[in-house]
């Protein structure tokens, strides 16, 4: 029994990830005690909070075996819509946030309906909308940020309780909701079922249209939340928000155990992966390593984790040789 | 996501050639040139023709860099990263006094090597090329930043810069000839060589290819190496045009090259699933994008909006292609 449970734990991978995270934290705390200062922990937790919804947005599309390249550019569009409404038209913040969420909803819905209706690969459709959303953002702003954000939005992004940013609380609630959707609701089960085996899901009477549209809409909403938090944190609505989301959006859910083919996602795993990435990032800074190493380490980590996952699945190597 | 085969059925309403994507592209390109030559004075001027053809040359080779991996059913997200690495290596060698020809040879070889690493990782791990190249695009870009210190290299060989500016008969850039030569070489490779045909076979059905004795591993590695090589050629052409090796030339981790790299082969009719290459189609796809971009710029639609148009065009093109495939096969799909 015990052995079976241990295997089960290893299989889901979260235990391994938590262990690596723990080792990294202890090692870093020993190497540089500055890691444990309240301010440094605040910085680390803030980056976790900022990335959480980005990663969950991609995780949601991955659950169905699809993907969205437009997570970042939709985020940028949401950011400038919120910023523009606040600065140019003096719209009250709650309304501006609602409008931002609506844009995220609409953008995700557009992706979903295009993919569900045409049956075209989600990669291609979201490559097109990635370009369209980014072009729209840049065209509307001419690449000039909105600087005058309401004080309440800035407070949202910068309030802290000791080492814990307020944003972390917000994203943990969001993560809990996402987790509940996948664990407890029918549509969540359907998304995973569709990802696990699209054909049998169709045969069992699932409305694939509904599932695909729901997943992309949910993803769009999560991008919007990520964008609004980022605006609050930066205190500026920059049109470039989202431009660096691509890699992290895939890296965190994949390191957290999700597979590109869908059928399995882990909110906990994704959060652990984000924490690990944030700690590694912080380590590079604290140990005075050239910040350019971040890219190399991130890429290397993705490679390492996906290879390990592959081995753990025990599938014959080279099975999907030409993919 | 059921796939619709391109296999032609008997119930066609139009002759086979008329439903080829190339014909549609030619019609649209001619229409656009006609419209812009009226609405945008100077669109057909020798200077603008030269400028468009020079950008186009880079875009065509970049499109081919993606097309060759699509042919084996893979993709290469690292084209931009590899491109920047090659550009910086080539520029760095020239700044160090290495002759231009030698620096270009080294750059191209480096591109092939980086692409080859992708290929080896794909076949050795059995992971999707999306995942592998997502990781390597970050690694290559980070390594490039570390080695170059993220600083542009400007002291290039004068002969190399001349190559970027040289023109024939006042309008035709010498660089365009490079793109044409690449197109001809690729056509020869896929049509006339055993390895080329085996590559397409691998893309169409890897299992069947392996069972019939095709060296599947070799063709996949080769496709990725070729992709890296072509990304390198595109980057060297862009460096010659710009007159400097610039670390930010393909944007953050090279992501700005993703859309142009995919849009040309996809517009040209290359299937993501592999098994086919559209060499003429990719050429025309890149041409459509270049003509549209230049025309929109000349009628004073800001650069920023062009990206929106490209996105919309890509969406319309793939949807139209889908509709045409359904329609011409007399099949409602699903």
Image: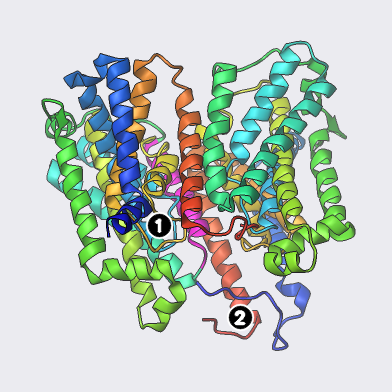
Residue situated in front as seen by the camera: B241 or A25: A25
Q: Residues within 10 Å of mark 2 (few under 14, many from 20)?
A: some
Q: Residue B125 vs residue A39: left or right?
A: right
**x and y percent of residue B119 in the render?**
67, 46
Task: Determine the secondary structure under disc 1.
Answer: helix
Q: Which mark is residue A120?
A: none
Residue situated in front as seen by the camera: B118 or B321: B118
Q: Residue B162 vs residue B292: left or right?
A: right
Judged from this view, the residue extending furthest toward the left is A161
Return the residue at label 2.
B327
Q: Is residue B96 magenta?
A: no
Cα distance between the residues tagged 1 and 2: 31 Å
The quarter of the displayed image where residue B74 is located: bottom right
Placement of B68 over or under B214, stated as above or below: above
For the question of whether residue A223 can be seen, the reply is no
The quarter of the displayed image where residue B94 is located: top right
**x and y percent of residue B165 in the render?**
78, 26
Q: Residue at x 87, y 59 (%)?
A: B194
Return the residue at label 1.
A62
For the question of whether residue A251 can be seen, the reply is yes
Q: Residue at x 42, y 61 (%)?
A: A262
Q: Label 2 lies in what chain?
A: B
Which segment did they paint magenta? A120-141
**x and y percent of residue B122 in the render?**
62, 49
Q: Residues within 10 Å of mark 1 (few under 14, many from 20)?
A: many
Evaluate whether label 1 is on the same chain as label 2: no
Q: Residue A143 vs residue A225: left or right?
A: right
Judged from this view, the residue extending furthest toward the right is B192
């Amino acid at each position: 029994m015990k052995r079976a449970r241990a295997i089960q734990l290893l299989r889901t991978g979260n235990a391994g990830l938590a262990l690596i995270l723990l080792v990294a934290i202890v090692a870093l705390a020993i190497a540089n005690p500055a890691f444990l200062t309240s301010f440094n922990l605040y910085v680390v937790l803030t980056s976790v909070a900022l990335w959480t919804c980005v990663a969950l947005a991609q995780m949601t599309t991955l659950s169905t075996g699809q993907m969205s390249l437009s997570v970042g550019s939709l985020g940028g569009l949401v950011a400038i819509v919120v910023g523009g409404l606040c600065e140019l038209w003096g719209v009250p913040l709650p309304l501006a946030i609602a409008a931002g969420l609506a844009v995220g909803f609409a953008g995700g819905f557009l992706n979903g309906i295009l993919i569900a209706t045409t049956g075209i690969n989600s990669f291609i459709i979201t490559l097109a909308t990635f370009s369209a959303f980014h072009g729209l953002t840049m065209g509307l702003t001419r690449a000039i940020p909105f600087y005058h954000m309401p004080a309440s939005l800035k407070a949202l992004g910068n309030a802290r309780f000791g080492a814990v940013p307020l944003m972390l609380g917000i994203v943990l609630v969001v993560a809990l909701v996402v987790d509940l959707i996948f664990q407890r609701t029918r549509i969540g089960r359907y998304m995973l079922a569709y990802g696990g085996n699209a054909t049998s899901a169709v045969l069992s009477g699932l409305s694939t249209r509904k599932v695909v549209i729901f997943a992309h809409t949910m993803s769009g909403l999560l991008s919007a939340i990520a964008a609004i938090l980022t605006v609050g944190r930066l205190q500026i609505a920059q049109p470039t928000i989202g431009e660096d989301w691509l890699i992290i959006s895939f890296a965190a859910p994949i390191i957290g155990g999700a597979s590109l083919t869908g059928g399995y996602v882990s909110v906990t795993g994704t959060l652990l992966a984000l924490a690990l990435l944030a700690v590694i990032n912080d380590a590079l800074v604290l140990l005075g390593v050239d910040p350019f190493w971040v890219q190399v380490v991130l890429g290397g980590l993705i490679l390492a984790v996906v290879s390990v996952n592959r081995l753990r699945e025990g599938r014959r190597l080279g099975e999907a040789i030409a993919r | 996501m059921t796939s619709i085969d391109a296999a032609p059925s008997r119930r066609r309403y139009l002759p086979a050639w008329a439903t080829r994507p190339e014909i549609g592209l030619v019609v649209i390109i001619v229409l656009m040139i006609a419209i812009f030559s009226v609405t945008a004075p100077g669109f057909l001027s020798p200077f603008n023709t030269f400028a468009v053809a020079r950008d186009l040359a880079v875009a065509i080779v970049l499109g081919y860099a993606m097309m060759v991996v699509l042919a084996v059913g893979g993709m290469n997200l690292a084209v931009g990263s590899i491109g920047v690495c090659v550009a910086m290596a080539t520029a760095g060698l020239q700044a160090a006094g290495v002759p231009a020809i030698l620096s270009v040879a080294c750059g191209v070889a480096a591109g092939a090597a980086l692409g080859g690493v992708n290929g080896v990782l794909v076949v050795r791990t059995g992971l999707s090329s999306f995942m592998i190249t997502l990781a390597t695009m970050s690694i290559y870009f980070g390594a490039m930043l570390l080695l170059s210190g993220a600083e542009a290299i400007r002291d290039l060989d004068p002969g190399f810069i001349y190559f970027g500016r040289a023109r024939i008969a006042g309008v035709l850039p010498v660089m365009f000839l490079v793109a044409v030569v690449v197109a001809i070489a690729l056509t020869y490779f896929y049509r006339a060589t055993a390895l080329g045909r085996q590559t397409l076979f691998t893309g169409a059905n890897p299992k069947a290819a392996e069972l019939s004795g095709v060296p599947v591993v070799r063709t996949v590695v080769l496709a990725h190496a070729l992709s890296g090589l072509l990304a390198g050629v595109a980057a060297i052409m862009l460096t010659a045009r710009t007159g400097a090796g610039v670390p930010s030339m393909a944007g953050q981790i090279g992501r700005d090259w993703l859309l142009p790299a995919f849009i040309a082969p996809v517009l040209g009719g290359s299937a993501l699933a592999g098994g086919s290459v559209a060499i003429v189609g990719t050429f025309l796809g890149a041409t459509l994008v270049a003509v549209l971009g230049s025309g929109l710029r000349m009628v004073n639609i800001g650069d920023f909006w062009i990206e929106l148009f490209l996105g919309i065009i890509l969406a319309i093109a793939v949807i139209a292609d889908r509709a045409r495939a359904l329609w011409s096969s007399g099949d409602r799909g699903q």
